[in-house]
Image (tube, rainbow, N blue to C red):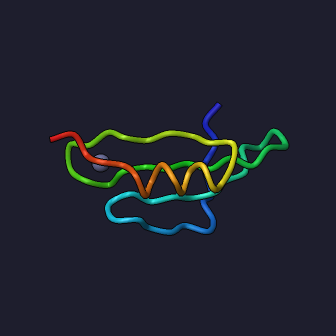
Amino acid sequence: MPRPNRFTNVVRFGPVQVGTYYDGRGRTKHVAACTAPRCDFSADYHGRPAAELAARTHRCNP
Ligand SMILES: [Zn+2]
């Protein structure tokens, strides 16, 4: 059941992007994803502040 994600309010904190999307089941989710090469960090959060905090404090694996 592929479902395209439409991200809104995308902002960037260093290499990490935070975006908000609607999961199609009545919920809004917030994702923080690192765009740095070889860093697979990505996580969903229920709240925008939590996602932004995670993005701001993220450190890529050495
Ligand atoms: Zn990273």
Q: Residue 8 placed where, x, y %?
A: 63, 65
Say if 35 sits above or below 26 in the image.
below
Say if 4 sits above or below 11 in the image.
above
Quadrant in which the C terminus is drawn: top left
Determine which quarter of the picture holds residue 26. top right
- The extreme top residue here reads 1
Q: Residue 38 placed where, x, y %?
A: 20, 43
Q: Considering depth in this image, is 35 or 59 the residue closer to the camera?
A: 59
Report whether 37 appears left or right of 59: left
Seen at 61% across and 68% down, the residue is: 9
How many numbered marks appear? 0
Quadrant in which the N terminus is drawn: top right
Report whether 25 appears left or right of 5: right
Q: Residue 16 placed where, x, y %?
A: 39, 57
Q: Considering depth in this image, is 29 or 23 the residue closer to the camera?
A: 29
Q: Residue 21 placed where, x, y %?
A: 66, 54
Seen at 32% across and 54% down, the residue is: 35
Seen at 79% across and 44% down, the residue is: 27
Report whether 18 appears left or right of 5: left
- The extreme left residue here reads 62
